[in-house]
Image (tube, rainbow, N blue to C red):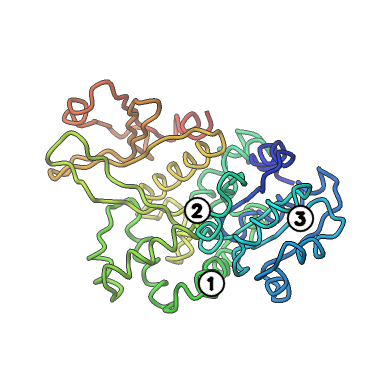
Amino acid sequence: MIERLLFKNVLERINRGKIIMMLGARQVGKTTLARQITEKVDLKTLWLNGDEPDVRELLSNVTSSWLKAIIGNHKLLVIDEAQRIANIGITLKLIADNLKNIKVLVTGSSSLELASLIKEPLTGRKYEFFLYPLSFNEMINHTNQLEESRLLEHRLIYGYYPEIVTTAGEEKELLSLLSDSYLYKDLLTLGHIKKSALLEKLLQALALQLGNQVSYNELGRLVGADNATIERYLDLLEKAFIIFRLPSLSRNLRNELKKSRKVYFYDNGIRNAIIKSFNPLAIRNDIGPLWENFLISERTKRNHYAGYWVNRWFWRTLSQQEIDYIEEYNGKLYAYEFKWNPGSRTKFPKSFSKAYPGSETKAITTENYLEFITT
């Protein structure tokens, strides 16, 4: 069993009288982690799955008296896939306010219904955690650093979804099944996206533009949709933890791009499955974007699990000067360029250093990437 970095964080907070929420895309291991936690606390547990129609009916539009009857003498309530349950925010608020001796653990495979409906009702009553696909850090804890470094090319192509990591030889088939529809189940079943063909075209366009700036106008022309639809679909895909957007840094220079953005996938394997490309790196023409996506997604996991709160951007000017990735931490800027080939020359624009004095710059390659994603 691969131990998740969230395990200890969640376990430490389960006795603090607040609802524990674990959010993340489908199949990243939320249910498995929830079961590990319930086994560790060893309390009489009631497990309810929001994917089941009778459970959705049971927990929709309830009263506190009805909840007490449902929970009975259980000490821990687990609600899996809670985003499928209507008015789940009100239900959880009733539990928090009226059943104070009950510990509650909630998982959601998207922030769509769950996060939007419970943010206000559960203010001050919850701890919220995000679970990503497996991370480089989690895998070196499970095996060792040498073994995981040897698998770097495999991870760049097939990614870190738990079933992909633990089922050698079936990666292509499993990723294809996952990326076809299951990963977007909430977007489709909850009615947020009705045109699945448009969703597929948009994802393919994003996957092919990996590492590049994305234009809503250009995406709209490619898939046949207006800007408002493109922005809405991107927002939903981001809330379902499939993609994330990186804005451009714009503070000091007149010619800095001010409203540009890049789009990345939380997992390389999902990205490659969308474009149906699992070729080895030696015959690919997208090694740079794959490397960039891998490093930024792993850095995201590293920062989140370690509790580092950072602002992040990319940087580009109208004259095409660019820096791949920038973080602001404790008031200081750290700029990074990502190079797959350690021998590639890296030159940071002087205009950036002049506009942002005191910032640090560093190239991340296959020779020093471990420090970037693990420490």
> Residue at 42% across / 35% down in the picture?
310
344 vs 42: above or below: above
Q: What residue type is labelled 1?
A: Ser
Give left or right: position of 74 versus 90.
right
The residue that label 3 is drawn on is 77
Which structural element holds mark 1?
loop
The label on residue 226 is: none
Mark 3 or mark 1, which is nearer to you?
3
Q: Are marks 2 and 3 in contact (CB under 8 Å)?
A: no
How far apart are the alpha carbons under marks 3 and 1?
29 Å
Q: How far apart are marks 2 and 3 (CA)?
A: 31 Å
- Give the image location of residue 263, x and y in percent: 36, 54
The circle on residue 267 is: 2
Tag 2, which secondary structure? loop
Q: Position of residue 108 (x, y in %)?
A: 61, 58
Q: How far apart are marks 1 and 2 (CA)?
A: 16 Å
The mark nearer the N terminus, 3 or 1, is 3
Q: How many neighbours does mark 1 have within 10 angstroms: few (below 14), some (14-19), or many (20 or more)?
A: some
* Mark closer to the observer (2, 3): 3
Q: Residue 181 carries which label?
A: 1
Query: Where is residue 45 drawn, in percent x and y?
Result: 82, 54
Q: Mark 2 and mark 1 in contact (Cβ < 8 Å)? A: no
User: In the rendered view, would you say 216 is above or below 37?
Assistant: below
Residue 235 location, quadrant: bottom left
Q: Which of 326 and 226 is in front in this view?
A: 226
Residue 230 relative to residue 105: left or right? left
Residue found 29% across the figure and 24% down from its top: 359
- Residue, far top: 358
Q: Decide: few, some or many residues near mark 2? Use Cα within 10 Å; few <14, some 14-19, many ≥20.
A: many
Task: Mark 3 and mark 1 in contact? Answer it, CB < 8 Å.
Answer: no
The residue carrying pointer 3 sits among few (fewer than 14), some (14 to 19) or many (20 or more) residues within 10 Å by Cα, namely: many
